[in-house]
Amino acid sequence: MEAIQREAIQTVLDKWQGQPLYLHLETTNGAYAALRSESPMAVCAYIRNGKIRYERGTIAGTGPYRIGLKMEDGWVYAEGLTDWEMDSQGRLLVAGHDSEGRLAIAFELSETPFPM
């Protein structure tokens, strides 16, 4: 992965607007929280292969970044994004890593289902 290139990601979001896609969205502080006395509770959110179609997709910020997808009846939103790539299968993979390089958030879109 490389540092986010906002314009490149926006181009992908614009291209996929209105198309049926698969979403992987995961946030975690996982086991890291157990090591911090000020925050002993681990939290996580996870969805894989959620079917989504959005009316508008936007990446914003100056780093870390946020992505919002406006759907007919609501929003999908991810914040804290730092790195990205388009993989060899054409999937948009965006992640947020903390100052120690640990994964904090993953936001991924694909025209085909993600492997289970």
Image (tube, helix red, strand yellow):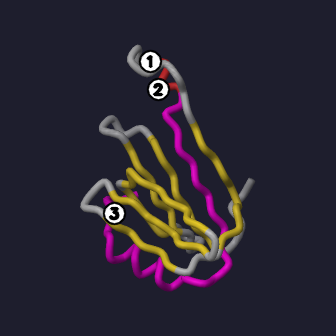
In the picture of the structure, the residue carrying the numbered disc 1 is: 35
User: What range is drawn magenta here?
Assistant: 1-30
Q: Residue furthest left?
A: 62
Query: Quick one: SS at disc 1?
Result: helix
Residue type of the residue flagged with mark 3: Ile
Indicate left or right for 98 with 69 as reference. Answer: left
* Picture layout, residue 105 above or below residue 34: below
Q: Residues within 10 Å of mark 2 (few under 14, many from 20)?
A: some
Residues marked 2 and 3 touching at CB (< 8 Å) = no
Q: Rounded to the nearest whole Å, what is the CA distance between mark 2 and mark 3?
A: 24 Å
In the picture of the structure, the residue carrying the numbered disc 3 is: 4
Residue type of the residue flagged with mark 2: Tyr
Q: Residue drawn 30% across and 38% down?
A: 99
In the picture of the structure, the residue carrying the numbered disc 2 is: 32
Residues marked 1 and 2 touching at CB (< 8 Å) = yes
42 or 91, which lies in front?
42
Residue 102, quarter of picture: top left
Rendering coords of residue 5 (x, y %): 31, 69
